[in-house]
Amino acid sequence: MLKQRIITGFVVVLALFSGVYFLPPFWFFIALTAIGAAASIEWAKMYQSMGKLGIAIYPCVVIALSLALYYFRDYAILFYLVGTALWLVFTVVVINAATTPPPKWLTEFSVFAIISLAVFAMAQLMVIPNGKFWLMGMIILVGVADSVAFFAGRRFGKSKLAPHISPGKTREGLIGGLLAVWAIALICGALIWSEEYSQIFVFALIFLLCALFSVVGDLYLSLQKRICGVKDSGSILPGHGGILDRIDSALAVAPVYTLCVTTILA
């Protein structure tokens, strides 16, 4: 299982980097939209929304919303802010889930907003100066936070992080993931800005903030799976489950990261 997880993770990251490097921005947006549509089908199956009709309607809505956001991309900053605010709401939902189950309408239909906003945010990174490198940085951030938290939790984990949502996640794993992201951000920041220490520190803080949102994204999907009574969102990715299982952290990170990069760093 672990070997499958590592191999699949490597293939996914390689495919993402290839897409970032070789695809023009618009076609990269189309590819992301297709992935988002496929992920929404998994969500519809989890919730069994409207049966087979839901499997057809969910991806259509995600595609339509993604295209609408792209068409009105002159208001990109507003969309990043909406996405960030939405994930702040979901942070509260995750924190309160042990005592106050979230309303079904909020969780079941949130998929349309979170996928569309994430697709748009990642696509927009491609069109800013050095956008490909910023996008690769986000992919590395999410991958490091998730992978190090997984292995640190397996090795040192004792204290449960959110046992009512995901019993396998531990505080030690969280700390390990955050420390790894912080260290990588400092190293990369030093390579980019050399002796501009204030810029390096801000860069590292943004990475740390986004790493926290990646945890929220992971826990939020875990909450959905617990509500629906399923272990994984799908089975298309060996060792990981479904597409949603692999992109849950990126869905939360994308609008926050893009907002910070476009307003502070780029």
Image (cartoon, rainbow, N blue to C red):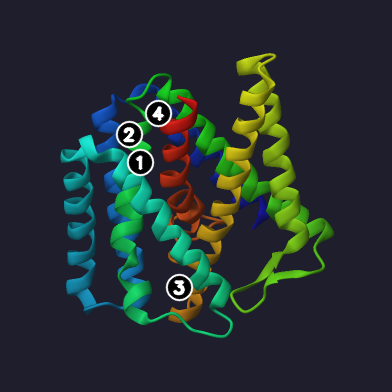
Q: Are marks 4 and 1 in contact (CB under 8 Å)?
A: no
Q: Earlier in the sequence, mark 1 or mark 3?
A: 1
CA gap, disc 3 to disc 2? 28 Å
Quadrant of residue 186 in the image? top right
Q: Residue at x 56, y 44 (%)?
A: 142
Q: Which mark is residue 121?
A: 1
Using a 10 Å C-alpha cutoff, classify the residue at mark 4 as few (fewer than 14 neighbours), some (14 to 19) or many (20 or more). Answer: many
Q: Which mark is residue 224?
A: 3
Q: Residue 112 at what x, y percent from top left?
A: 28, 61
Quadrant of residue 239 in the image? bottom right
Q: For this rendering, which residue is in front, 133 or 208?
A: 208
Q: Residue at x 23, y 68 (%)?
A: 55
CA gap, disc 4 to disc 1? 14 Å
Residue that label 2 marks: 124
Residue with the most extreme front position: 198
Using a 10 Å C-alpha cutoff, classify the residue at mark 3 as few (fewer than 14 neighbours), some (14 to 19) or many (20 or more). Answer: many
Q: Which mark is residue 30?
A: none
| Above/below status of 207 relative to 87 | above
Q: Which residue type does callout 4 highlight?
A: Val
Using a 10 Å C-alpha cutoff, classify the residue at mark 1 as few (fewer than 14 neighbours), some (14 to 19) or many (20 or more). Answer: many
Q: Quadrant of the C terminus?
A: top left
